[in-house]
Image: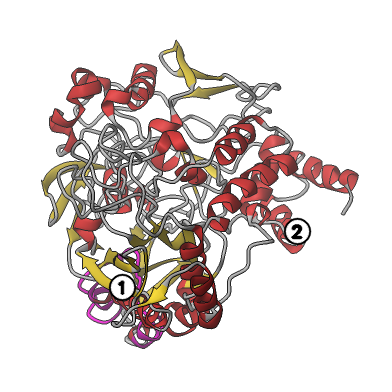
Amino acid sequence: MNEQELRDLIAEVADGKLSRRNFVRQMVGLGLTAPLAGMMLAHSGVAYANATLPYKPEKAGGGGLLKILLWQAPTLLNPHFASGTKDQIASRIFFEPLAGWDKEGNLIPQLAAEVPSKANGGLSADGKEVTWKLKRNVKWHDGKPFTADDVVFTAEYAADPATAAYTTGAYSNIKVEKIDDHTVKITFKEPTPFWADAFVGVTGQILPKHHFGEYKGAKSREAPANLKPVGTGPYKFVDFKPGDILTGERNPDYHIPNQPFFDRLEVKGGGDAVSAARAILQTGEFDYAWNLQVEDDVLKRMESGGRGRVSTVVSGDIEFIILNTTDPWTDVDGERSSIKTKHPTLSDPKVREAMNLLIDRDSIQKFIYGRGGTATASFVNEPKQFKSQKLKYEFNIEKANKILDEAGYKRGSDGIREKDGKKLKYVFQTSINAPRQKTQAIIKQACQRAGIDLELKSVTASVFFSSDVANPDTYTKLYCDMEMYTTTQPQPDPERFLNQFVSWEIANKENKWLGRNVSRYSDPAADEAYKAAQKELDPVKRAALLIKVNDIFCEANVILPLLSRTRVAAGANNLMFDHSGWDVDTWNIAAWYRT
């Protein structure tokens, strides 16, 4: 299809002669992704879709109790501190952004009256301004009105370095101003091709100024609302026992007519993924379970029970390993894995290259994950135009041994390689989860054949993914030699996803380990390419810059991608839920109902 034919199709969508859905299908048929097709329409002045899950109930309430199972239990309810997905999911029940992402990558207005576009005047021609019009007559759960003041405050709160917010990167280089009580304008320093970051999706949940105003900056962790939220969402807070159970009740003043359907909501934490799957698919004790990182054969057997169904959606999530190039065993000013230190052996590129060859990705996919993931060598895999085509993976124990031999690492009497008195012995940690422990075992076995000794460590998921700054076992602390987990891509564009690779996001004591670069590794070339991509309006050039950032870290073998993950959840057969791979599971919980 040539450029003129594409422009003609877009014009037909704008005129109503061609449906968005059929346009997206044609683009997918040409090898593009649904999210890219949606963004293409938006950049051409065609407004985003305004509906996602058809909602059939004719009145709010009457649905009784909705029971959700998050086997990784939430520990806090402030979305701007929620570095773990479990806390983001729980927070989204009460707080809302201006817009969220549906499973096709469309922006859906939530607290916004409409999604900005060139057609409605919300996007400037030079790519430097975005104007959001807010819904009117929206109330906070305490009855106070939601206004532009809350939106402006949220940006100030998140951007303040002393707040140490997980979302700082989305707000630190923008100007947000109030036009009137129901209009805000964002001004970017440079042309910004992907503007849907601040106030959108995971990073965009709006906080009430009257509850957090006194707690911006150094006092941010003292706010009572961190554990007792007052939001605008479909459910009002009732009670929360961190690490255990969260309860809510229907918001009678919710701003969408006839929603929500359920009267009460219960989010139970704890257990494991297998038990969560069983509670939906076999026993029917719960209505919905998230993140079913369960061997696919086990899920298929459970589905035959007939109580529930498994839902898999495309996402940009990645299961991967970090090799720590800093020293996790040396304390510097109250901080281990400090960038002021150097790992005794993993700072050697040859050791990291050998480690990457000792991962049997194909077996991990085939025998463990099945529908849950596809083997990959690239950190970014979706949308496809951002995936590196030159990165390839290989499982080759013989080649790994040769590399280590040539690098001067000799086997000792115990069979473990060493050089200059430094042994290739590593602590390899991840969360407690059957597929992850089996993956660890596969990698350990291959490493043994190459003279590398791995001590396998597994941490309770609610601890591993906790935002508790006092806990040494959180994944952001990286107080080990290597670790494995899944990181979620929160939008159908990898720009924010890749800020895990920039120097100014390095997790450390100063930012309470909420910086997104958990690896601590940095490269000036990656920083330069990332900054260039942030202002590059040509989509082809921008994609190339972001791929370069991806390649620098993958080729350095600091980041070892394993599987491009689909998002796997399960729901009761009679539950209608809106499962998106580009936002958290509760992004549109207001529209869930039971048939």
Q: Is residue 549 left or right of residue 44?
A: left
The N terminus - image quarter: bottom right
What's the magenta region? Answer: 275-301
Colouring rule applied to residues: secondary structure
Q: Amino acid at mark 1?
A: Leu
Q: Is residue 14 visible?
A: yes
Please tell me whether residue 292 belongs to the stretch shown in magenta: yes
Q: Is residue 301 above or below residue 281?
A: below
Residue at x 50% of width, y 67% of height: 407
Q: Is residue 287 above or below residue 298?
A: above
Instruction: Please report whichever mark, 1 or 2, sits nearer to the chain's N-terminal start.
Output: 2
Q: Which marked residue is nearer to the observer: mark 1 or mark 2?
A: 1
Residue at x 34% of width, y 70% of height: 292
Please rate how many residues cluster around mark 2, counting C-alpha atoms within 10 Å: few if below 14, some from 14 to 19, many from 20.
some
Q: Is residue 257 left or right of residue 141?
A: right
Q: Which residue is mark 2?
A: 26
Q: Which residue is mark 1?
A: 454
State the image coordinates of residue 68 (x, y, percent, origin top left): 25, 61
